[in-house]
Image (cartoon, rainbow, N blue to C red):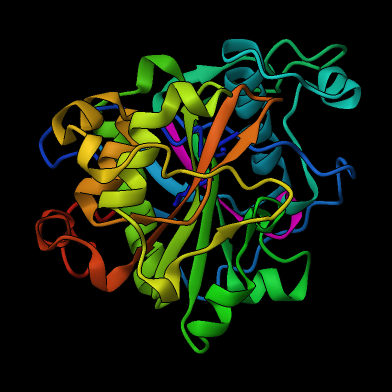
């Protein structure tokens, strides 16, 4: 779930995907490590009857990318946030291109937030890049969406690199699932308006494609599970996913989350120790898998997050509209 709930989240770095309605919390998701094959050929997406413009608030618009060059602009934004701001370690090619890329980009849909009141004059510090012929509205946020039918036809789900999701898919055969990840927002735009538009865009997409559940990886900062004993144990004892949705970390990567007994946990202190993203997921109704995964490249400890649509708290459905009409374009 984010991603969704994946960008090491990502691995969605998700900072807040589902803020409390009316809150001013922002969003920032971190990406997972890229597969070995970089820069695949990007194709024009088939939106299957969905209008690419999904919603607006003031000068901000949320839409789906419709051209490969829009995906490349999203990749430049991801590089700027993940590698320049957050200090993730890029590959040589990614550093040369100044783009965060992996093979999944060619098979996913890409959600964009665009500010029509701001323009970008050229790609972000890309060597030898030619200036744009004319200024273009700035892409200030992005999110990557991978439906199960797309995953089945291509490389599977990205989360499968950390979690055994096959039993979850088998237990929920016939349900449509969506993996969220690679989300980021420029720092000045990490505001309530941007968060609302991202959620509005995802909610519109979920309704159009009749998605039954979203999942992905969320991250806690740090790679020492013992220092994260309180939040990990809280998620294990108080927010464990039902068995049918409980993906388990791969055996070679599995880190036990029940590091403290339930009786030793102060729930209030545990909530305070959680990243805002994960607190947001808890509010909206998400639950968590079995075992954490340490991602040393991004300096995080990841947890699997799952959110069946039927489990979304009614106040969030009411806030954005059962037919996603709150910020409709």
- Whether residue 107 appears in magenta in the rendering, the answer is yes
- Expressed as whole percent of the image width and height from the top left, the position of residue 249 reads 60, 54
Q: Is residue 150 above or below residue 135?
A: below
Q: Position of residue 130 (x, y in %)?
A: 81, 17
Q: Residue at x 36, y 40 (%)?
A: 233
Label count reads 0
Q: Nearer the viewer, residue 213 or 302?
A: 302
Front-lying residue, 250 or 121 = 250
In this image, 67 relative to 155: left or right? left
- Residue 125 vertical placement versus 258 (above, below): above
Q: Is residue 137 magenta?
A: no
**Percent position (x, y) of residue 208?**
39, 73
| Relative depth, front residue between 104 and 75 | 104
Q: Main secondary structure of the magenta part?
A: strand
Question: Which residue is at a point 69% across and 26% down the rendered structure image?
Answer: 296
Residue 28, visible in the rendered structure: yes
* Segment tinted magenta in the rendering: 105-114
Residue nearer the viewer, 240 or 51:
240
Residue 164 rendering spot, x and y as whole percentages = 64, 63
Q: Quadrant of residue 159?
A: bottom right
- Residue beneath the point at 87% across and 18% down: 96
Can you see residue 196?
no
Query: In the drawing, does residue 16 fall left or right of residue 238?
Result: right
Position of residue 184 in the picture relative to residue 285 (left or right): right
Residue 211 figure quarter: bottom left
Q: Residue at x 76, y 39 (%)?
A: 34
**Residue at the farthest bottom position:** 174
- The part of the image, by quadrant, that contains residue 265 is top left
């Amino acid at each position: 779930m984010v991603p969704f709930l994946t960008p090491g989240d990502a691995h969605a770095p998700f900072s807040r995907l589902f803020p409390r309605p009316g809150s001013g919390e922002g969003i920032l998701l971190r990406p997972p490590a890229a597969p070995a094959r970089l820069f695949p050929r990007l194709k024009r997406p088939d939106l299957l009857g969905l209008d690419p413009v999904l919603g607006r608030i003031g000068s901000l618009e949320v839409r789906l990318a419709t051209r490969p060059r829009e995906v490349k602009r999203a990749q430049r934004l991801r590089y700027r946030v993940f590698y320049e701001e957050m200090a993730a370690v890029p590959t040589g090619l990614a550093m040369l291109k100044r783009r965060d890329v992996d093979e999944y980009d060619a098979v996913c849909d890409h959600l964009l937030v665009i500010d029509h009141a701001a323009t970008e004059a050229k790609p972000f510090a890309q060597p030898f890049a030619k200036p744009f012929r004319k200024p273009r509205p700035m892409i200030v946020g992005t999110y990557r969406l991978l439906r199960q039918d797309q995953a089945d036809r291509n490389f599977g789900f990205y989360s499968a690199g950390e979690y055994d999701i096959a039993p979850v898919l088998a237990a929920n055969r016939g349900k449509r699932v969506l993996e969220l990840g690679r989300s980021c927002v420029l720092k000045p735009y990490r505001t309530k308006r941007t968060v609302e538009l991202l959620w509005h865009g995802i909610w519109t997409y979920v309704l159009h494609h009749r998605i039954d559940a979203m999942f992905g990886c969320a991250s806690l900062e740090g790679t020492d599970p013992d220092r994260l004993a309180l939040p990990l144990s809280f998620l294990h004892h108080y927010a464990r996913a039902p068995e049918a949705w409980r993906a388990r970390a791969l055996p070679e990567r599995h880190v036990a989350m029940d590091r403290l007994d339930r009786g030793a946990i102060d729930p209030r202190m545990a909530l305070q120790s959680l990243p805002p993203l994960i607190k947001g997921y808890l509010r909206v109704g998400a639950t968590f898998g079995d075992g954490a995964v340490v991602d040393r490249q991004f300096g995080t400890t990841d947890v699997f997050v799952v959110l069946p649509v039927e489990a979304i708290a009614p106040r969030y459905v009411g806030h954005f509209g059962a037919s996603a009409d709150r910020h409709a374009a």
